[in-house]
Image (cartoon, coloured by chain):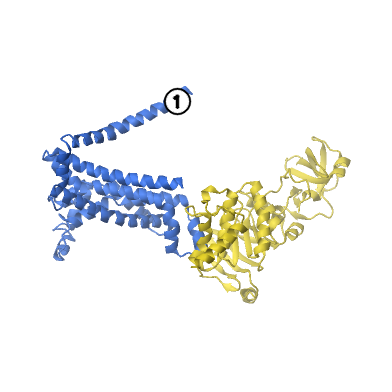
Chain colours: A yellow, B blue
Amino acid sequence: MAAAKNQTEVPVENGIEVVDVSKQFGDFQALSNVNLSVPDGSMTALLGPSGSGKSTLLRAIAGLEVPSEGKIFISGEDQTGKPVRNRNVGFVFQHYAAFKHMTVFENIAFGPKVRKRPKAEVKKQVNELIDLVQLTGLGGRYPSQLSGGQRQRMALARALAVEPTVLLLDEPFGALDAKVRKDLRSWLRRLHDEVHVTTIFVTHDQEEAMDIAQQIVVMNEGQIEQTGTATELYDTPVNDFVMGFVGEVNSIGGRLVRPHDTEVLPVKAEGATEVEVDRVVRLGFSGRIEMLTVPDKREVWAQLTRSELETLNLEPGDTAWVKPKPDAVTREDTGALESAVTEDPPATGKPTPVEPGLPV
Amino acid sequence: MTGERLTRWGLRYIALAYLALLLVIPLGYMMIETFSEGIQPVLDSITEPDSIAALKLTLLTVAIAVPLNTVFGIACALLLVRSNMRGKGIINALIDMPFAISPIVVGLSLVLVYGTSGWFGQPLMDLGIQVIFSTPGIVIAVVFVSLPFVAREVVPVLQEIGDDQEKAAETLGSGSWNTFWRITLPAIRWGVSYGVVLTMARALGEFGAVSVVSGKISGQTETLPLYVQKQFETFHSVGAYTSSLILAVIALATLLAMNLMRRKENDE
């Protein structure tokens, strides 16, 4: 155990190293033995349902929570016992935490002023940041005069103003509506290309994580289930929880399978589950069949090409059979997903009607 | 629709009538009575030495009680809302004591403890400090009765704003003292100022507790409310009304000042 620990205890590279971190709140185990490496300059997503410990881990890295056990390194330096204000982290809160009595300019200038930078320098830097986050001309406004998206961009500029070693974002787009969310997401990705600061963000939205993160950390019940790229998580999930949380799944005959790996058969076959066709949706090139299993009426859907749909020629009310395709990625359904996803269900199971293309 | 309208109008007039009967008419009538014999008697009673002494003493107690209770109130509110300290429940309950206890009882208990035969009375006397029947006793009584206002106004504001802004300031490198001055205090300023106005009103007008501990020595330990009562009892109605009016004007002026500041800021 000691020997294995020593390999990670002295991180050579920059970035963030989380070593055996646990956190208890009374009887509740928020984090248990979490180990994580975040490469320097990368963009990492902490993905999981609410209560999975992702926010606690982020706050522990910032120093806003003190781990019960374990160590956290930033740029190779042990952060244990180091107060938040000395860690030089940029932290963006879900609800912006805007200083309401200060203008946009004053909000962004807060960090540099605390650091007693010369006035002229602060002014120049803040104006540059205002341009960077596209709030040009709004420096004199108060947070109450900004939209949600503008407020979040201001919060981001404020965090960047201290030239942080790491940028930590706690559900940064959680309080915004869907359209603004998507815009801000791709904007954040471009910003990261420009600024290149090691970034970790927390989200319960798998699409958001897959869209902008180079590395995704899937968390559940205070533990890391799997770390990898979006493709790795999608193609080779370690268990049914990861499979269900990253990408969409059906549960057929006790196994999880992707909708595009779900084969629909017009006749009964070995190992297939009987279903009743509920709806057939044609969306240009592709389409889907939504079905209910017989007799327990669980929702199942298959993603098919147009020609497959035409060959099957199924109508609502028809009986059909479904099973995983021979080469499909499947995982045993242990019910881990249902038990974990209580408050914030990710976009799984139910098809999102605006997306005609294949996932990923 | 009409029923709803009727209810709204009805409620409005009931509220107005209530305020008029209890507040506007008595105060207005008092104002008229003050000037019933012309302006000269009013000016005379203002410049009366005992009246000036009473006003000075009142303003002195206000000047001590208000800052003291403001600092204490903010500190208490921060302790109650932001800390995980044990014994918070006890502090929370104790803060309300001055609201719950009759001022007369407060006065009597102070006499018991600080009077010549009390626990602290004689030792303090030996040091040359007389508490009861003297200014320190009056100040203590006023501080006691006006203690809860700032804390009670600030606690809900602190709860509502949450600690996100303070945490954000911390991540930006701000120490706790700087965070308090630059983030917390500006965020709770209206709660504080309302608490200050209420504290001040209470400190200005406190009668019961002060009347027990002061000894009511004219020109020395008489606050303005005590002076009003003495004037009234000795049939100097103009003197009583004038001093009452001074008290009311000071209170109204502070209330007005706060409202103006607030309105000005909302306009920005």
Q: Give the side of residue A108 with respect to residue B22, left or right.
A: right
Q: Nearer the viewer, residue A333 or B144?
A: B144
The percent coordinates of residue B41 (x first, y second) are 14, 40
| Residue A66 visible here | no
Which residue is identified by label 1? B5
Q: Can residue A222 be seen in this view?
A: yes
Residue at image point 40% right, 27% down: B9
Residue under the point 38% across and 48% down = B261
Left or right: residue A6 versus residue B235 is right
Task: Look at 54% across and 54% down and name the residue there.
Answer: A139
Q: Kindly state the secondary structure of the residue where label 1 is placed.
A: helix
Residue farthest toward the right in the current orientation of the protein: A311
**Which residue reaches farthest top?**
B2
Which residue occupies the foreground of this view, B39 or B94?
Answer: B39
Q: In this view, does A237 lie to the left or right of B144?
A: right
Above or below for B263 versus A234: above
Q: Residues within 10 Å of mark 1 (few under 14, many from 20)?
A: few
Q: In which quarter of the image is residue A15?
A: bottom right
Give x and y (percent) for residue A59: 55, 61
